[in-house]
């Protein structure tokens, strides 16, 4: 490649186009120089090479990256009742966190009420319990939902929970068109990895399509789907599998939107991604770079996107929960810091750092604060946010990026063949055949073997055990009273609502669920307002959709 | 490790409650299989009643419960009690996230062994062997 300077009348070089985009972007008011005072450019590399903000976006979705805006420090939180979590949200916002991220408890994630027999012992333990609109209102009490952005990790019951959120926000005076945030709503990876499924894949995908159409029409600031590799990786996949299965699911949602009658550029700009940041520092960075490049090429070349925003992959990162150890838990702070750094050097748009005590319980307030402080140290002390894609051009990282891309393409080809030329059908067939699940379980076992024979070293687990006998740190304890309290709240809501309104809302849901042409979101919002509970809503939908059971395989 | 023609024993591994995180239970199933055990996996979303029924039907030598969600206090004791009500001394081993403060409650409920995250394959196999042998004496 030659680096000819552009002459007047010539097309501008990539560097000149990059510079123009940077000049048009906001600039954070900090010195862009090393600690010793050496001035630092926004990007390095040949002027005619790839640049951030330019197709295929290997080096970043935006030209100026963190020079304009640091990543969003979005800490996932939720426990106990809505009142408990509301207090934690306010504490995180007061400490410099700048976006909310709701962790729901298992009954909520599975679309069950707190008084369901299967919910016994699970209410408020892994997240916050939300049964009705009353809980959703309490969750966000005195928080301006137009001024912050809200991410909700919810999948099988994503549509009814989203309906409750919209109803709660509007009840507090917000306009739905001004609400910004993300619904995880990635049902495919539930069957593949996370296993929080309720309905079978096909009717579940109809609910996803309904939320996509609803957001495209009414909520321009909302990300209807966060296509998530995090859980695929946590379930044991390799980095390349995480990348390939996640982007493959992303392509499936693109096809789903197109089949629902939407033009790709009408919804693809609002698709976002969620990746894991695992232990292998350079491999993770290569993974993020490959992800952006693959997405851009597929969206343009296979799905006909013309809007740049459709081709720019944007993602949230969470450090790898599975890499944390119960032994010597303070060491988890170090692991998390390095994983987080990989996410930042890989160009993440938002980041959650795990707390050191998360293998033991939900994080204590102190552990959660240290996790947030970890991001602040990376952002402000280490000066790593001054240059976009600082590892671009590293022979190692470039080669790894190409290699992971090639591995992912081979996996796409398999899924595409399963679906007879459709990534959407291939994803469903692969789930029904257990192909994804088997591949992930095989990879998990392979890593376990490496751990057991010492090829994979984990400090405190198979090496450097001194200190393992120290007592565990104090952990957050969710008392059983939380469950009783939440059941009482639900009973109060049920006693205060209009039974006739509930019956009417449920009847409408059953009718509309049977008609795939109808968008269920309006009926779900009305049901939320009538204080129909989440469990009642899901049961009504299951009458039509049925329930999914996985064949046990080991 | 598998030196015998006879299986080392039959083990039921189960996921109790709503939690779907099945990486651990599947890895443990393969570890035990590699060690010569016959392993039956219940699949997800079991109740104490379905686990006890499966243990009876399958005539197993041990039951392993994967508990990651914090519901162990509510869900584990009924499994042990249900097995005893069937007249079985089948040992119950719990693997997963059990805070130290809950270990006495697990022991009191009659749980034979609690395996923490990070337990090695050897430790898992030894715990199952120990539990089966203790239940036979």
Image (spheres, coloured by chain):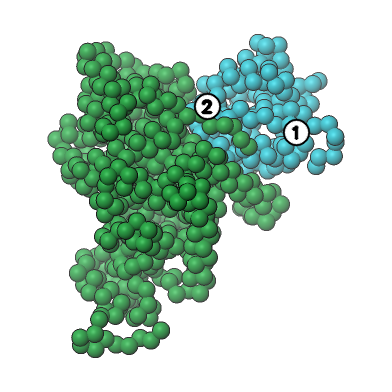
Q: Which chain is cyan?
A: B
Residue denoted by label 1: B37
- Viewer-nearest residue: A57 or A435: A435
- Locate residue A11 relative to residue B84 in the image: left or right: left
The C terminus of chain A - image quarter = top right
Q: Position of residue A169 (x, y in %)?
A: 20, 35
Q: Chain A shown in which color?
A: green
Could you tell me which residue is drawn at 49 percent across and 59 percent down?
A409
For disc 2, the chain is B
Can residue A172 be seen in the rendering of this structure? yes
The N terminus of chain A - image quarter = bottom left
Looking at the image, is mark 2 or mark 1 earlier in the sequence? 1
Distance from the alpha carbon under mark 2 to that under mark 1: 23 Å
Q: Position of residue A420 (x, y in %)?
A: 47, 48
Q: Position of residue A10 (x, y in %)?
A: 24, 85
Could you tell me which residue is drawn at 40 percent across and 51 percent down?
A251
- Locate residue A162 relative to residue A474 in the image: left or right: left
Label 2 element class? loop
The vertical placement of A60 against A414, above or below, is below
Q: Position of residue B49 (x, y in %)?
A: 58, 17
- Mark 2: few/some/many CA within 10 Å (<14, 14-19, 20+): some
- Viewer-nearest residue: A60 or A550: A550
Residue denoted by label 2: B45
The vertical placement of A462 against A157, above or below, is below
The vertical placement of A408 against A49, above or below, is above
The vertical placement of A405 against A516, above or below, is below
Could you tell me which residue is drawn at 51 percent across and 34 percent down?
B20
For disc 1, the chain is B
Could you tell me which residue is drawn at 22 percent across and 31 percent down?
A522
Label 1 element class? strand
Labels 2 and 1 share a subunit = yes
């Amino acid at each position: 490649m030659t680096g000819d300077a552009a002459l007047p009348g010539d097309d501008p070089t990539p560097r000149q186009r990059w510079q123009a985009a940077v000049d048009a972007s906001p600039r954070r008011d900090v010195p862009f120089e090393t600690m010793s005072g050496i001035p630092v450019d926004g990007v390095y590399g040949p002027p005619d090479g790839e640049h951030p903000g330019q197709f295929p976006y290997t080096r970043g979705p935006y030209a100026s990256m963190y020079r304009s805006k640091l990543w969003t420090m979005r800490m996932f939180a939720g426990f106990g009742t809505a009142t408990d979590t509301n207090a934690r949200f306010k504490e995180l916002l007061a400490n410099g966190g700048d976006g909310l991220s709701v962790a729901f408890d298992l009954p909520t994630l599975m679309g069950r009420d707190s008084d369901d027999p299967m919910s016994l012992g699970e209410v408020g333990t892994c997240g916050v319990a939300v049964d009705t609109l009353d809980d959703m209102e309490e969750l966000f009490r005195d928080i301006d939902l137009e001024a912050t952005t809200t991410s909700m990790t919810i999948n099988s019951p994503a549509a009814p929970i989203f309906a409750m959120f919209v109803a709660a926000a509007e009840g507090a005076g917000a306009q739905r068109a001004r609400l910004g945030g993300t619904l995880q709503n990635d049902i495919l990876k539930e069957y593949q990895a996370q296993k929080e499924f309720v309905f079978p894949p096909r009717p579940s995908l109809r609910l996803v399509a309904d939320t996509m159409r609803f957001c495209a029409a009414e909520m321009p600031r909302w990300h209807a789907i966060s296509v998530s590799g995090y859980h695929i990786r946590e379930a044991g996949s390799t980095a390349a599998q995480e990348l390939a299965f996640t982007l493959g699911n992303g392509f499936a949602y693109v096809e789903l939107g197109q089949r629902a009658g939407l033009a790709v550029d009408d919804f693809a700009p609002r698709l976002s991604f969620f990746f894991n940041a695992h232990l292998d520092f350079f491999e993770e960075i290569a993974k993020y770079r490959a992800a952006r490049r693959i997405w851009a090429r597929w969206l343009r070349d296979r799905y006909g996107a013309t809007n740049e925003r459709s081709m720019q992959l944007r993602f949230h990162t969470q450090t790898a929960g599975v890499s944390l150890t119960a032994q010597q838990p303070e060491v988890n702070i170090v692991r998390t810091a390095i994983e987080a750094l990989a996410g930042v050097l890989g160009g993440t748009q938002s980041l959650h750092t795990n707390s050191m005590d998360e293998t033991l319980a939900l994080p204590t307030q102190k552990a959660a604060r240290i996790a947030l402080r970890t991001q602040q140290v990376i952002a402000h002390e280490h000066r790593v946010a001054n240059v976009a894609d600082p590892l671009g051009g590293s022979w190692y990282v470039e080669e790894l990026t190409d290699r992971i891309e090639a591995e992912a393409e081979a996996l796409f080809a398999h899924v595409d063949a399963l679906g007879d030329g459709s990534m959407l059908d291939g994803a469903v067939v692969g789930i029904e055949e257990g192909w994804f699940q088997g591949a992930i379980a095989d990879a998990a076992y392979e890593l376990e073997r490496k751990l057991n024979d010492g090829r994979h070293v984990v400090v405190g687990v198979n090496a450097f055990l001194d200190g393992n006998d120290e007592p565990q740190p104090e952990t957050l304890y969710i008392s059983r009273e939380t469950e009783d309290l939440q059941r009482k709240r639900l009973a109060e809501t049920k006693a205060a609502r209009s039974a006739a309104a509930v019956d009417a809302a449920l009847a409408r849901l059953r009718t509309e669920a049977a008609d795939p042409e109808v968008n269920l979101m309006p009926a779900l919002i009305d049901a939320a307002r009538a204080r129909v509970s989440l469990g009642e809503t899901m049961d009504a939908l299951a009458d039509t959709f049925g329930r999914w059971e996985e064949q046990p395989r080991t | 490790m598998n030196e015998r023609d006879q299986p080392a024993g039959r083990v039921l591994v189960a996921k109790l409650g709503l939690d779907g995180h099945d990486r651990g239970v599947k890895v443990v199933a393969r570890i035990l299989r590699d060690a010569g055990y016959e392993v039956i996996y219940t699949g997800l979303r079991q109740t104490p009643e379905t686990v006890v029924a499966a243990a009876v039907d399958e005539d197993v030598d041990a039951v392993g419960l994967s508990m990651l969600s914090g519901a162990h206090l509510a869900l584990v004791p009924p499994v042990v009690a249900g097995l005893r009500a069937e007249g079985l001394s089948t040992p119950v081993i719990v693997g997963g996230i059990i805070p130290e403060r809950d270990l006495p409650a697990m022991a009191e409920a009659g749980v034979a062994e609690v395996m923490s995250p990070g337990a090695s394959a050897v430790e898992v196999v030894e715990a199952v062997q120990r539990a089966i042998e203790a239940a036979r004496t």
